[in-house]
Each structure stands twice: as C-alpha cells, then as structure tokens.
Amino acid sequence: MSEPFEELEDRYRSALNRMSKAYQVLWSIMGDPKPLAPGEEPPVLTKEHRDAQTEAMKASQDYISVRDLYWATRWGREGNPPKP
C-alpha cells in the first residue's frame, strides 16, 4: 500500500528544506564561486568545506528521489499532467 499523499508531501517539503539549508551552509562557507586565474592553484578544502559539500550532495540525492515521486503523484492526483 502506498503512503497517503499528505505524508509524501511532508517528506517532499522536508527533503526540499534540507537541501536548501545544506546549500546555504555550503555557500556561506565557500563564498561566491570564482574562476581560477591562469596558473592559480585550486583552493585548499578544509574538513568543514568537504563536510558541507558532502551534506549538500546527499541532501540533493535524497530530494531528487522524493521529488520525482511527489510530482508524479501530484500530477496524477490533480489531473494536471506536465506540459512539454
């Protein structure tokens, strides 16, 4: 039996919020991305940087799987199929 739509929507919102927060943390640590100048060395990534990147990646992966299920269910529930 599939979960009720309301529970799926809660999971979707939670995953979306987790991803948003993870990327806010990552951007606050990393700063604005800037291209490297010719001959410039890449910045050294601290453990804090790597941990923030890892959390952002994991949050994105979790969000994508829930997102696809949520929107497929919502479109079917509302009779509003996606438009090309």
Image: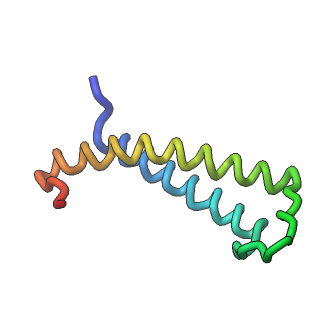
* Left-right relation of 26 to 76: right
Q: Position of residue 52 (x, y in %)?
A: 74, 54
Q: How many marks?
A: 0
* Left-right relation of 5 to 29: left
Image colouring: rainbow
Query: What residue is at 45 percent from the left and 46 percent from the top?
Result: 64
Q: Is residue 70 above or below residue 52?
A: above
Nearest the eye: 74 or 51: 51
Query: What residue is at 39 percent from the left and 48 percent from the top?
Result: 67
Nearest the eye: 82 or 70: 82
Q: Is residue 59 above or below residue 34?
A: above
Nearest the eye: 42 or 16: 42
Nearest the eye: 32 or 60: 32
* Left-right relation of 25 to 43: left
Q: Is residue 79 above or below residue 4?
A: below
Residue at the top extreme of this rendering: 1
Query: What residue is at 62 percent from the left and 48 percent from the top?
Result: 57
Q: Position of residue 48 (x, y in %)?
A: 84, 54
Query: What residue is at 62 percent from the left and 60 percent from the top?
Result: 21
Residue at the front extreme of this rendering: 39
Residue at the left extreme of this rendering: 79
The quarter of the picture where the C terminus appears is: bottom left
Q: Quadrant of residue 37?
A: bottom right
Q: Is residue 19 above or below residue 1?
A: below
Q: Position of residue 58 (x, y in %)?
A: 61, 43
The quarter of the picture where the N terminus appears is: top left
